[in-house]
């Protein structure tokens, strides 16, 4: 038998296979494509399952907690139940930043990060309202406490810019606490600047100063007094009344020559002490007169009889203690004296006696009480000698022109 070639063998095999029609070929191709698609989908599903098995976690990501708060496991989980195996320590819970915790879910441990944040302002406690003396230095942070929910330094400061420690009155201070995260808390408190009415408080002077003061004018003696002051190159303070309206123009004359015009009383009747309302009505009236003739708003006063007078108790017991405080809270300063010429003891007191009383003692701050009425002619006559005495002893003469000068009687008797 003859040996067949490759081509001949191929032809014989081809003839032995039944021919397929075109429809069968299309079906085969469709089946093949479907099988390939199923395999591809299966491969994708397997890949996703394997990836999720490797990367899936039941914990929430990006969890934040306010400093000082307690971390609960529910805050960390998506849906499943779990146990907080390693939470935040007390120190970590108050320390701003990221910290690792461990949660056990379904017997498996998961580690995640929790961020402690601080959005809460500090808390200021133990503040109070203050009462301080004029010129007094006071630490307003004394006793004040500041707490914060987070670790870190908290700075406490006090804004005292609204206080004028040289001026009596009611003011407000503000406590400001700022924590390490920049959160700020503020709290206000009241500060009352006043004087203890039982104390005489004078500003310390190294130089020797004398304040000549004249009560009860203006009168026919005002011009002679002012002229003597001019001749000697000195000034004084006049605590005026409205007893002699014909001499009101002397307020202007004294003021224009460098003297201070301050309030004594409009009526000089002690009945003004029957109550606070009556007193302040009288004060307002005399201040209106001073404003008219000097153009200035006066804040310096001398009580009729002085702050320690005993007559007022017959009208309203204890009123002087109240008035000495209230006038200061309204921005006034009251001025008593520490030297009495005694010219109020009678009319025409001998000149020699007046000079002796006015010059008998001296210190660095001398505030001398004299009177300016028509009956006090010997006061006018004694004035040049009084001036000479203090000049010879190196004193400077000043008028009381602002509320910083304080001369209060040591004891209030009613």
Image (tube, rainbow, N blue to C red):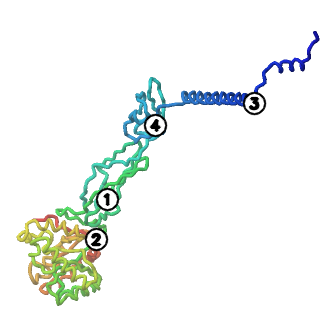
Q: What is the count of numbered marks?
A: 4
Find the distance from the CA under tag 3 to the CA under tag 4. 67 Å
Circle 2 sits on which residue? Answer: 208
Q: Identify the mark nearer the N-term, 2 or 3.
A: 3
Compared to residue 199, the image places residue 290 above or below, namely below
Picture disc at residue 22: 3
Picture disc at residue 114: 4
Q: Identify the mark nearer the N-term, 3 or 1.
A: 3
Q: Nearer the viewer, mark 4 or mark 1?
A: 4
Compared to residue 189, the image places residue 10 above or below, namely above
Residue 319 in the image: x percent, y percent? 11, 67
Circle 1 sits on which residue? Answer: 173
Q: Identify the mark nearer the N-term, 2 or 4.
A: 4
Q: Identify the mark nearer the N-term, 3 or 4.
A: 3
Q: Identify the mark nearer the N-term, 1 or 2.
A: 1
On the picture, is 91 further left or further right than 36? left
On the picture, is 312 further left or further right than 71? left
Quick one: label 3, few (<14), some, or many (20+) residues within 10 Å? few
Q: Name the residue at 34% across, 60% down.
A: 160
Residue 29 in the image: x percent, y percent? 71, 29
Considering depth in this image, is 299 or 1 the residue closer to the camera?
1
Q: Residue furthest top?
A: 1
Find the distance from the CA under tag 2 to the CA under tag 3. 134 Å
On the picture, is 96 further left or further right than 334? right
């Amino acid at each position: 038998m003859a040996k067949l070639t490759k081509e001949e063998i191929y032809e014989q095999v081809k003839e032995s296979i039944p021919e397929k029609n075109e429809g069968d070929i299309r079906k085969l191709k469709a089946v093949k494509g479907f099988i390939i698609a199923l395999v591809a989908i299966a491969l994708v599903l397997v890949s996703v399952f394997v990836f999720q098995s490797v990367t899936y976690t039941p914990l929430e990501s990006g969890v934040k907690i306010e400093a000082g708060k307690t971390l609960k496991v529910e805050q960390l989980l998506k849906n499943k139940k779990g146990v907080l195996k390693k939470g935040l320590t007390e120190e970590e819970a108050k320390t701003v930043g990221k910290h690792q915790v461990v949660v056990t879910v379904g017997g498996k441990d998961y580690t995640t990060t929790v961020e402690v944040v601080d959005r809460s302002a500090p808390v200021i406690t133990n503040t109070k309202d203050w009462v301080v003396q004029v010129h007094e230095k006071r630490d307003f942070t004394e006793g004040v406490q500041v707490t914060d929910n987070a670790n870190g330094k908290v700075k406490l400061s006090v804004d005292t810019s609204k206080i004028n420690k040289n001026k009596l009155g009611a003011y407000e201070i503000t406590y400001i606490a700022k924590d390490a995260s920049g959160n700020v808390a503020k709290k206000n408190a009241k500060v009352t600047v006043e004087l203890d009415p039982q104390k005489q408080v004078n500003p310390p002077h190294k130089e020797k100063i004398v304040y000549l003061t004249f009560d009860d004018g203006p009168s026919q003696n005002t011009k002679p007094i002012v002229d003597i002051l001019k001749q000697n190159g000195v000034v004084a303070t006049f605590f005026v009344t409205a007893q002699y309206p014909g001499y009101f123009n002397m307020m202007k004359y004294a003021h224009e020559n460098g003297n201070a015009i301050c309030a004594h009383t409009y009526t000089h009747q002690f009945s003004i002490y029957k109550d606070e309302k009556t007193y302040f009505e009288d004060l307002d009236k005399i201040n209106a007169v001073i404003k008219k003739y000097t153009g200035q708003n006066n804040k310096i006063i001398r009580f009729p009889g002085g702050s320690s007078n005993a007559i007022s108790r017959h009208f309203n017991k204890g009123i002087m203690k109240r008035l000495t405080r209230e006038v200061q809270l309204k921005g006034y300063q009251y001025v008593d004296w520490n030297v009495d010429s005694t010219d109020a003891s009678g009319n025409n007191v001998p000149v020699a006696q007046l000079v002796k009383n006015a010059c008998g003692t001296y210190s660095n701050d001398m505030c001398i009480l004299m009177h300016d009425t028509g009956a006090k002619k010997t006061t006018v006559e004694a004035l040049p000698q009084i001036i000479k005495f203090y000049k010879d002893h190196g004193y400077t003469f000043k008028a009381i022109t602002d509320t910083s000068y304080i001369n209060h009687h040591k004891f209030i008797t009613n």
